[in-house]
Amino acid sequence: MSKKEKLIKKLQSLPKDFTYAELESLLSQLGFVIDNKGKTSGSRIRFYNKELKVQYLAHKPHPTKVIKEIALKDILSFLENNNLI
């Protein structure tokens, strides 16, 4: 099983310990790049897939690195609705 498949499986289980770094890695493997508006974007991070012309706006969690369950559900829904998983 590839790293991408492991991350997808982990995301689908909606774990309590899914980190922002894991999200970044998964979206990168799905063809997304981080596209922020510079230093003023704050904790909002834009992931953009040029090939599919879709974007996902995420909130970089702080002070912890763990993504909340409601955000994981939103990410999962976005990926499923765009046929990425």
Image: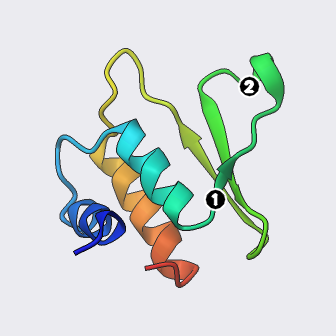
Please state the horizontal and vertical placement of residue 49, each as a whole percent of the image. 71, 64
Quick check: 71 left or right of 59?
A: left
Residue at numbered disc 1: 32
Residue at (53%, 80%) from the top-left corner? Answer: 81
**Vertical comparison of 48 with 41: above or below:** below
Residue at numbered disc 2: 41
Residue 84 or residue 78, whichever sits in front: 84
Toward the front, the furthest residue is 2
Residue at (37%, 15%) from the top-left corner? Answer: 63
Please state the horizontal and vertical placement of residue 19, each as a whole percent of the image. 32, 39
**Residue 72, labelled with which disc?**
none
Give the SS element for disc 2: helix
Please state the horizontal and vertical placement of residue 23, each as a whole percent of the image. 42, 49
Nearest to viewer (mark 2 / mark 1): 1
Q: Looking at numbered disc 1 in the image, what kind of residue is underneath it?
A: Phe
Residue at (51%, 78%) from the top-left corner? Answer: 84
**Vertical comparison of 38 with 25: above or below:** above
Q: Looking at numbered disc 2 in the image, what kind of residue is underneath it?
A: Ser
